[in-house]
Image (cartoon, coloured by chain):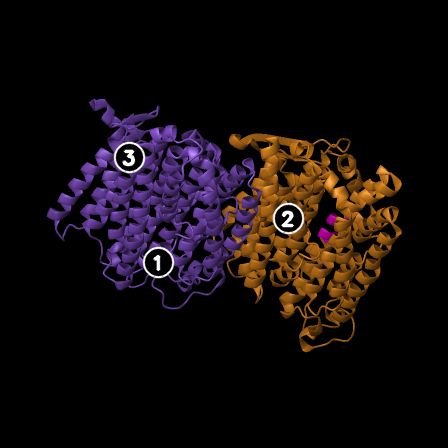
Chain colours: A orange, B purple
Amino acid sequence: MHGLLSILIWLPIAAGLAVVLLGDRNIVAGRWLALLASLATLALSVPLWSSFDTSTAALQFPEKLPWIPRFDAWYALGVDGISLPLIVLTAFMTVPVVIAGWRVIDTRPAQYYAAFLIMEGLMIGVFSATDALLFYFFWEAMLIPMFLIIGIWGGPRRVYATIKFFLYTFLGSVFMLTALIYMYVKGGSYSIASLQALPLTLVEQRWIFLALLLAFAVKVPMFPVHTWLPDAHVEAPTGGSVILAAIMLKMGGYGFLRFSLPVAPDASRELDLLVIALSLIAVIYIGFVALVQQDMKKLIAYSSIAHMGFVTLGAFVIYEIVRNTGSVQGAGMGLDGAMVQMVSHGLISGALFLCVGVLYDRVHSRQIADYGGVVNTMPVFAAFMVLFALANTGLPGTSGFVGEFLVIIASFRASFWYSLLAAVTLVLGAAYTLWLVKRVIFGPVASPRVAALQDLNGRECIVLAALALAVLVVGVWPAPLLKVMQPSIQHLVSQAIATKL
Amino acid sequence: MNWSSLAAAVPEICLAAAICVILLVDVFAGERRRGLTPTLTLLALAVGAGLTVQYGHVTQRTVLFEGMYVADELGFALKLAAFLFVAVALLYSRTYLENRSILRGEYYVLALTALLGIFVLVSANSLLTVYLGVELLALSVYAMVAFDDSGISAEAAMKYFVLGAIASGALLYGMSLIYGLTGTLDLGEIAARLHAPFSPGVILGLVFIVVAVAFKLGAVPFHMWLPDVYEGAPTSVTLFIGTAPKIAYFALTLRLLAQGLAGTESEWSQMLAALAVMTLVVGNVVAIVQTNLKRMLAYSTIANVGFIVLGFVAGTPDGYAAALYYTLVYVLVALGSFGVILLASAKGFEADQLEDYKGLYQRDPPLALAMMVMMFSTAGVPPLVGFWAKLRIFQALWETHHLWLVVIAAATSVVGAYYYLRVIKLMYFDEPAPHLPPAQAAAGVRLALGLNAAAVLLLGLLPGPLLDLCARLIH
C-alpha cells in the first residue's frame, strides 16, 4: 500500500490536533476519537508487517518527496527489519496508554490524549525516516509533547524532572546534529544510506562516534548519563512512563544500530570496550541500585536501565566476537539479542508501569512500604503483576528470556567474563523484581487502604491481558520476529564489521 | 540623473512623503480624532509596500545618486520585510499605548522616521549614507525610548543616547581613517582599493568600525545598553527596537564589513569570532538569572546576536545567507514574543515580570500557546523555524572548518534552552497568581499574533522557500 508510512505518522498527529480542537468540553468524543485513532494506527501497522518482504534487507514501503532542495533533504521514509518491529511496538503500546488514561486523567484531558497521539506519530516518524535531517526533526520534535506530559500531569517534583529530562536529551541531540551536519557538509547529502556509505578517516569517525554516543547514550540511557530517567519516570503520569520506557528508550538503541555502527564502524570497533564496559556497569551497578529502591516506579526505572544495558552490550559485543572467533554468524546473534531485548523490554516495562499505575490510581502512593498483601484483595491483578515480574527476571517462556539469552550467549563467544558479568543480571534482576513482588503482592494485608482495594476493572483487564499475551507470544515463539529482522541484521553486521578506511 | 532612476528609491520617497503628511494631519486632527494617526500610518505602510513592489523592484544591482545609494534585490526584500515587521509591531502596540496614555501622533512619526533610517542603511553604498542611516535610525529610537514620562524610561533613553553617541563617534572615527587611507567614501571603491598587506591605520579604522557594529548589534562586551534599554523602554518600544532595526544592523554589517571592507575579512572575522563567543556565553548565562521577562529576552537577544555574528565569522556567501536567514527568523520570533507581552498587559499592569506569566495558560490559552511556540522556536527545537536558523549557522561554520565555534554554539544553546523552558514552565505548569487583570486585546490583534505563531510553525515545517530566498539574495 502506497503512503502507508505517511498515514501511520500523520493519522495520529491529525487525530491529536482534532482532539485538542474538540476541547475538554467534548472529552467523551475526544477520548473515543483518540482510542479509534490509536486502534486505527495499530490496525494499519498490521499490513505493514504482513506485506513486509522478509527476504531482503532493502528499505520497503519507500516514500520520497522533496522537502528542502537546498540541503538535498527529503521527506524520505522506509522500513527495514530493524525499524519495523519498533514501529509496530509503538503502535501497539499507544493503545494501552490511551485506555489507561480513560477515567484517570481529569485535568486538561483533551491535551493529554493529543500529546500522546502526536508523540506516537513523531516516534513512528523517527523509526521510519530514511533521511537524517528528517530523523532529527522527528527526534527533537518529540521532546515537546513529552516535556508537557511530565510537566503538566506529573507528580510533585515534575518541574525538576521534566526540565532535567529536556536538557539532558537536548544536550545529547545537539551534538548529534553537529555530527550530522559535518557529514552533510562532507558528503553533500542527508540521506542515511549515503551517510553510511560516506568514507571517513579514523579521526573523523572517532569524533562522530562520540557525538552520536552522547545523543544515544542519554536516550538509552547508559551509565553515567542515566540520572534523568529515574526522575522522569517517577514524576511522569503512568502513560508518560509507559511511552518513555517502552518506546523512547528504544530510540537510543535504534540510533546505535542505524547510525553509530554503520556510519562509524572503525571507531565503533576501536571504542567498543568503552560501550561494553558502560553496559556491564549498567547491568551490575544499576542492578544493585534497583535493589535498594523504596519507590516502585524508581525501581522499575533502574531495572529499565539495567535491561537496556543488554541492548548496548549486544550491539557492541559483535566486534569482540569477530575479533576472537571470526564468526560473522555469532555477531548477528548479538544484534538479534539487542533487537529482541528492545521489543521485549518495551512490552514488559510498559506493562509493569501500567501495573504500578493501577495501584497508584487506587492508593495514590508509589512507596513499596505502603503495600503488602495485594493478592488478597486483587487476585487477578496479582496474577498479571507476577507474570510481568517474572518476565522481567527473564523467565523462559516470556519475551524477557529470549533477548537476554541471545545476548548472553553472544557475549560468551566474545569472552567468558562478559557473559559471566552479564549473567549476574539473572540473579540481580530476580532479586530486585521478586523482592518487589514479595513486598507488594504477597504477605498479609498491610493496611486498611490495601484491604479496601478493588480488583481490576474490565478496561484495565483488557490492557494487561493484551500485554501479557504479547509477552508470552514473543517468549514462546520468537521465530517470526527473528525472521523479519534476519536480512537487515545480516546487512547491518556486514556494514558494521566492514572498514571505511 | 533621470527620473526613471528614482524608481528604485520609491520606498524612501513614499515614506518621507508619508511622514510629512502624517505629521501635519496629526497636528490638525486634535485630541478627539486620536485614532486617525495609527490608522493612517498602517495605511501609509501598506501603500508604501505596494508601491515598492510595483515600482521599486530591481533585478540588477544598480548604483544611484553619484554612488551614494545602491538598489539591489537584497535591499528590495529587506525593505519589504521591514515594512511588514514595522506594521505588525505598530499593530500590536496600539492598545498598550492607549493603556499607558502615550498614544500620540509623534510616536508613529518617530517609528516611520526610524523606518526611513532603516531603508537608508539598507541601501547605503557610501560611508556617508551609512552614517546618515545609522543616525536617523538611532535618533528616532532614542526619542521613542524616552516616550514615557516615567523615570526608568528616561534613564534608559539617556543611557542609550550616551552610549550610542560613543558608538557613533567610534564609527565616524573608523570611517575617517578608512577614508583617509583610501581616499574614497564609496564602499565599492574602498573594496577595490584595499589590499593586503594593510597599513596599521586600516586595521585601526577597522577596529573602530567593528566596535561600532558590535555596539549596534548588541554583541558582548558592547552590549551594556541593551538590557537596560529593553527593560526601561515602554514594551511597545522594546518590541520596535527588537525587531525591524535588527534587519538594518544586519545590512550595516553586510555592507560595511562583508562588502566594503571585504579585503580585510581575515582580520575582522577573527575579531567577530572572539565577540561571538563572548556574546553567546554571556547572553545565555546571564539570561538564566533574570526575573524580568523583558530583560531576559534582552539577554536572549544578545545570545541570538551571537549566532548572527557567527554567520559573518564564516565569511562566505553561505555564511552571510545564514546570518540573513537567522536575522529574519529572529525578528519574526521576537515580534511574537514581545507581542505576547504587549497583549498580556493591561491598564496599570505591565506583564513584564516572569511572575506575571504564572498560569497564563489558565487565564488565556491562545496567548500561552503563542508564547510557547516562540520560546521553543528560540530554543531551536523542531518543528519550529528557529531550529533551521541554528542549523544553517552550524552548516556555514562547518563549511569553513570552525570546529570550536560549532561546539561552543551548540553547548551554549543547550544552556539557553533552560530559560526558555522556564517561561513555558511558568505558563503551563504553575497555578496562576490571583487578581491579574484579563488580557484585553482586540480580536484582530490576537489574530495577527496567531498568524505570527502559525508562520513560525509553517516556516519550520517547510523551510525550503525562505532558505532559498535568503541564499539568492546574497549571491
Q: Quick one: SS at disc 1?
A: helix
Determine the residue positioned at 34% across, 32% down. B182
Q: Say which of marks 3 and 2 sits in front.
A: 2
Cα gap from disc 3 to disc 1, whole angstroms: 33 Å
The image quarter containing residue A244 is bottom right
Cα gap from disc 3 to disc 2, whole angstroms: 46 Å
Q: Residue B469 carries which label?
A: none
- The 10 Å Cα crowd at callout 2, few under 14, some 14 to 19, many 20 or more, is many
Q: Which mark is residue B49?
A: 3
User: Is A28 above or below relative to B46?
Assistant: below
Q: Left or right: where does residue B110 sit relative to residue B220?
A: left
Give the chain letter at badge 2. Answer: A
Instruction: Give the residue pinned by disc 1.
Output: B228
Check the picture and name the quadrant holding the C terminus of chain B: top left
The image quarter containing residue A390 is bottom right
Q: Where is residue A320 in the image (x, y as percent from the top left)?
A: 83, 44
Please state the total of marks drawn on the protein image. Answer: 3
Q: Residue A215 carries which label?
A: 2
Determine the residue positioned at 36% across, 35% down. B255
Q: Are marks 3 and 1 on the same chain?
A: yes
Dot 3 or dot 1: first in sequence order is: 3
Q: Are marks 3 and 2 on the same chain?
A: no
User: Is B441 above or below relative to A37?
Assistant: below
Q: Quick one: SS at disc 3?
A: helix
Give the chain letter at badge 3. Answer: B
Q: Say which of marks 2 and 1 sits in front.
A: 1
What is the magenta range? A341-347
